[in-house]
Image: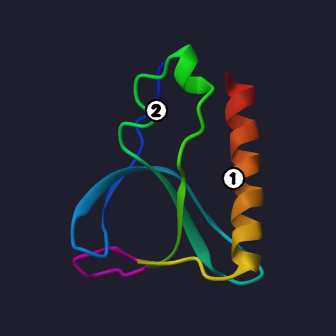
Amino acid sequence: MAQEEKERIIIPDENGNEHLFDELFRFTVDTTGNSYLLVVPVGENEDDTEEDDEEEQEVFAFRYEDREGEENDIALFPVETDEEWSVIEEMLNTFSEEEEEEE
């Protein structure tokens, strides 16, 4: 089975060091209009083996806004509220269940 190519994104940390991430998925919440991006560090999900499948991946979530016409096409913001985290958790669980069903 061919693995689809994931979008990669570089995110700088608070010290300006750049880190490469694979995008898991993006979604927008209809009621708020907020958009979210979920990513995992590159290398954590490559070359999966049976042993790796049982380990949990570290997932990072950000609220984002499109910035058309600028050097950076999106602006990332930290997730700040418990309500946002609840929505993200629910979407991640749904995504994880769909991934398991595809296997």
Residue occupying image coordinates x 27% and y 82%: 69
* Residue assigned mark 1: 92
Q: Is mark 2 on a helix, strand or loop?
A: loop
What amino acid does circle 2 point to? Answer: Glu
- Secondary structure under badge 1? helix
Q: Position of residue 20 (x, y in %)?
A: 30, 52
Residue 87, x across and y down, in percent: 75, 68
Q: Is residue 58 above or below residue 32?
A: above
Rendered location of residue 43, percent (x, y):
36, 37
Task: Examine the structure image and report whether residue 43 is included in the region drawn in magenta.
Answer: no
Residue type at mark 1: give it.
Answer: Leu
Mark 1 crowd level (few <14, some 14–19, many ≥20, 10 Å Cα): some
Q: In this view, does 58 lie above or below 63?
A: above
Task: Tell me, yes or no, whether the highlighted magenta stretch contains residue 67.
Answer: yes
Provide the residue span drawn in magenta.
66-75
Left or right: residue 89 versus residue 16 is: right
Q: Judge depth for marks 2 and 1 and give the one in front.
A: 1
Q: Quadrant of residue 71?
A: bottom left
Q: Indicate left or right for 56 with 88 as reference.
A: left
Q: Distance between the residues labelled 2 and 1?
A: 19 Å
Looking at the image, tell me whether mark 2 or mark 1 is earlier in sequence order: 2
Instruction: Name the residue rendered at 55%, 42% in the picture.
Output: 57
- Determine which quarter of the picture holds residue 88: bottom right
Please name the residue shown 58% across and 77% down the image: 79
Residue picked out by circle 2: 4
Q: How crowded is mark 2: few (under 14 residues within 10 Å), some or many (20 or more)?
A: few
Question: Which dot marks residue 47?
Answer: none
Quadrant containing the C terminus in the rendered view: top right
